[in-house]
Image (cartoon, rainbow, N blue to C red):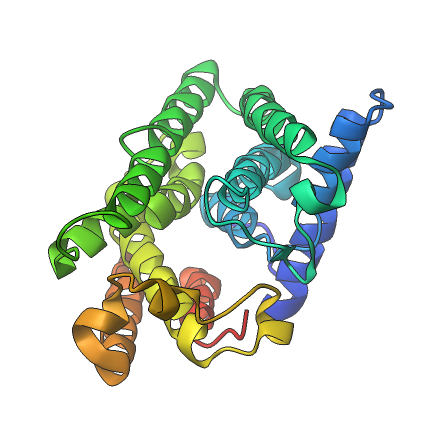
């Protein structure tokens, strides 16, 4: 029997964010250091979408939040690390993240680098505290390493940086490959956390996660064009100003919106075998292209 899902999506996301923040703060409570405070600061204030996917796919497989919260905190730590480093002057050189000063602005660059490094380490510490079988914990950790590494997020980021000085713009296929690593890999890992913990079939949620990750990135591209900086919580218009190849530069704004809607349909269709139990995950798919930040 499934654990209860008593809250609407917006409330459930907010509750997840609070639970993740509290879990990370508890893990760092013994360290009275600026770098530990920077780590906690970097995790605060996000949507906790990835952490929510961990908890919701666990619930879908009959696993309660108490057993999965460490994995949810782990993915949010790893995501926060990536944002800290992405904001650095040597990368995107951003002053704002989630409506607040970026970590290197609030502290300094050295603290930001170390905070990001330490959050990556903490992510693997936390994922190995997940309450499931040793085999499942190993699978979660191995999958997280692959999703975060050169075959996933880091590889996508490296492609993005290389594209800034390339002689020719990226093709649409290149943009899709770049974003499937940079953005999509961690989202797919989050969607697979539940079936990995339950030692269940990964295929439906792999299709769901991949489609969701692509839709999420297209929505980010749209927000960079149409979003309001005060709502988004960071600078907008940077992609166009930098001449970056994006889904919008290839498909146009309307074409990108159509593709995002098609991907939401693909994500929702992948959940057919779960029936009405997966309605929250369908809500998540619809949310990622309707959000304003």
- In the image, residue 165 above or below residue 230: above
Position of residue 148 measured from the top left corner of the image (x, y, whole percent): 39, 32
Residue located farthest toward the bottom when viewing the structure as drawn = 254
* Residue 81 visible in this rendered orientation of the protein: yes
Position of residue 166 measured from the top left corner of the image (x, y, whole percent): 19, 48
Question: Which of 71/108 is in front?
Answer: 108
Q: Which residue is drawn at 50% across and 77% down?
A: 227
Q: Which residue is drawn at 60% across and 41% down?
A: 64
Residue located farthest toward the top when viewing the structure as drawn = 134
Q: Which residue is drawn at 45% across and 31% down?
A: 197
- In the image, residue 30 above or below residue 69: above
Determine whether, in the image, residue 144 is placed left or right of residue 5. left
Task: Write down the quadrant of residue 260 in the picture.
Answer: bottom left
- In the image, residue 6 above or below residue 126: below
Question: Which of 234/30 is in front?
Answer: 234
Position of residue 212 measured from the top left corner of the image (x, y, whole percent): 34, 59
Task: Write down the quadrant of residue 200 in the picture.
Answer: top left
Question: Which of 251/3 is in front?
Answer: 251
């Amino acid at each position: 029997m499934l654990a209860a899902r008593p809250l609407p999506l917006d409330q459930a996301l907010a509750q997840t964010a609070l639970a993740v923040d509290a879990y990370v703060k508890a893990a760092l409570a013994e360290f009275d250091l600026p770098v530990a405070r920077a780590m906690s600061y970097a995790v605060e204030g996000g949507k906790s979408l990835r952490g929510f996917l961990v908890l919701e796919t666990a619930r879908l497989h009959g696993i309660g939040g108490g057993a999965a919260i460490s994995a949810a905190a782990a993915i949010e730590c790893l995501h926060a690390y990536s944002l800290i480093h992405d904001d650095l002057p040597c990368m995107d050189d951003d002053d704002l993240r989630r409506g607040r000063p970026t970590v290197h602005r609030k502290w300094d660059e050295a603290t930001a680098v170390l905070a990001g490094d330490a959050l990556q380490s903490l992510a693997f510490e936390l994922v190995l505290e997940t309450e499931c079988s040793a085999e499942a914990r190993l699978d979660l950790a191995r999958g997280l390493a692959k999703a975060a590494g050169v075959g996933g997020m880091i590889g996508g980021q490296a492609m993005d940086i290389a594209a800034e000085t390339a002689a020719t713009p990226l093709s649409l296929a290149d943009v899709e490959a770049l974003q499937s690593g940079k953005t999509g890999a961690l989202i797919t890992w989050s969607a697979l956390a539940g079936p990995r913990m339950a030692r269940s079939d990964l295929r439906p949620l792999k299709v769901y996660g991949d489609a969701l990750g692509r839709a999420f990135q297209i929505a980010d591209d749209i927000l960079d064009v149409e979003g309001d900086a005060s709502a988004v919580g960071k600078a907008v218009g940077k992609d166009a100003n930098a001449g970056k190849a994006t889904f919008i530069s290839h498909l146009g704004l309307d074409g990108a919106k159509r593709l995002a809607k098609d991907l939401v349909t693909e994500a929702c269709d992948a959940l057919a075998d779960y029936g009405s139990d997966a309605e929250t995950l369908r809500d998540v798919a619809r949310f990622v292209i309707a959000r304003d930040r």
